[in-house]
Image (cartoon, grey):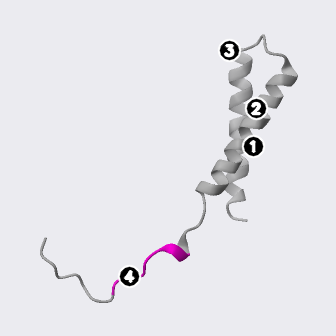
Amino acid sequence: MKRFSFIIPIMLIVAILAMWILNKNHSQVPFDTRIIIAAGGSIVSGIVAFFLLRNDVHKIDSKPIEPNKKKR
């Protein structure tokens, strides 16, 4: 659930920026199509953020007990 506190704002930012860019640069595109494009982009960014913000706590190697005395 902690990941969703980052994913939802990312999706909102992507949707707002997509609508702004589509309105500014591509005003000839119909409004309903712009909404579909922005929604698709925000969903894709949310899915990517979900997998990239994964918590890898259990996959970290433990700290070595003995100090490493090898010369470099």
Tell me the SS state at disc 4.
Answer: loop
Q: Which residue is drawn at 42% across and 81% down?
A: 62
Q: Position of residue 68 (x, y in %)?
A: 22, 81
- For marks 1 and 4 on the same chain, the one whose residue lies earlier in the sequence: 1
Give the Cα separation between the discs numbered 3 and 4. 53 Å
Question: Quick one: which residue is furthest to the right in this view?
Answer: 32
Tell me the SS state at disc 2.
Answer: helix
Q: Give the range drawn in magenta.
A: 58-64
What type is the residue that disc 4 sits on?
Lys
Mark 4 highlights which residue? 63
Q: Position of residue 59 (x, y in %)?
A: 51, 74
Q: Neighbour class for label 1 at 10 Å: few (<14), some, many (≥20)?
A: some
Asked if disc 3 and disc 4 are in contact, CB closer than 8 Å, the reply is no
- Quadrant of the snapshot with the N terminus: bottom right
- For marks 3 and 1 on the same chain, the one whose residue lies earlier in the sequence: 3
- For marks 3 and 4 on the same chain, the one whose residue lies earlier in the sequence: 3
What type is the residue that disc 3 sits on?
Asn
Mark 2 highlights which residue? 38
